[in-house]
Image (spheres, helix red, strand yellow):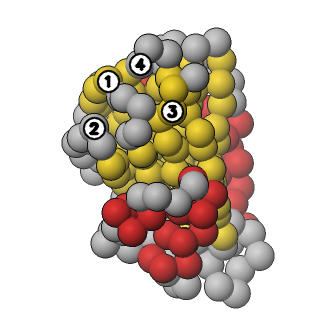
Amino acid sequence: MAVRLSVAHLSRPKVGEVENGDGVLVRTEGRYTLLAVVDALGHGPSAAQASREAFRCLSQVVLDTSVASMAEALHVALKQGRGAAAMLAVFDGHTLHCGGVGNVELRTVGTRVPVLPTPGILGQSFRSLRTLSTPLAPGDRLALFSDGLSFRVDLEQVRTQSPDMACAFLLERFGRTTDDATVLVADVEPS
């Protein structure tokens, strides 16, 4: 059975800042969809510049390569800047391939995706990326988020809400005013 993703995301800078060092990239190429949440170190203009560099790199990577290769490209692209944490997830229409570096999270409702972010900072240092691949099914929900949201995020509270409404609720309820904050919610739906 063919499935597709219904995706929404929200991001906001730290209270008192204008520029945001967090961000999201959702990109589809053929049957592949990349979901990426990037959290550049710190906040403000320098963090926003690092985030832009990350998205410039991710907008050019080939999506049918491994998540580990994408993380390595991102690591090289961020070498001259402040560095970032990132969660990268590629969905091929059936299987989710994912991995992260630093303080970013991927949580699910439905199919369990026990991805554990690799300690470190892209652009500075990190160990070999821990990746995971698992089939997804209609009804599954993914949430990727930066540490600008409390890690106490409870997806059951938004289980019946649309991805847009879920993002708004999670950012409002679990967002920290002391940091940039970003959340992406993706539902797996029949196509």
Question: Residue 155 at x, y = what percent?
Answer: 37, 61
Q: Would you name the residue on which mark 2 appears?
A: 111
In front here: 189 or 42? 189
Q: Would you name the residue on which mark 4 appears?
A: 94
Q: Distance between the residues labelled 4 and 1?
A: 6 Å
Q: Distance between the residues labelled 1 and 2?
A: 8 Å
First of labels 1, 2 by sequence position: 2
Q: How far apart are marks 2 and 3 (CA)?
A: 13 Å
Q: Are the residues flagged by discs 4 and 1 in contact, CB closer than 8 Å?
A: yes
First of labels 4, 2 by sequence position: 4
Local SS, label 2: loop
Q: Does residue 179 show up?
A: no
Give the mark toward the camera: 4 or 3.
3
Give the mark toward the camera: 2 or 3.
3
| Residue type highlighted by circle 4 | His
Asked if 55 appears above or below 20 in the picture, the reply is above
Local SS, label 4: loop
Local SS, label 1: strand
Q: Would you name the residue on which mark 3 appears?
A: 189
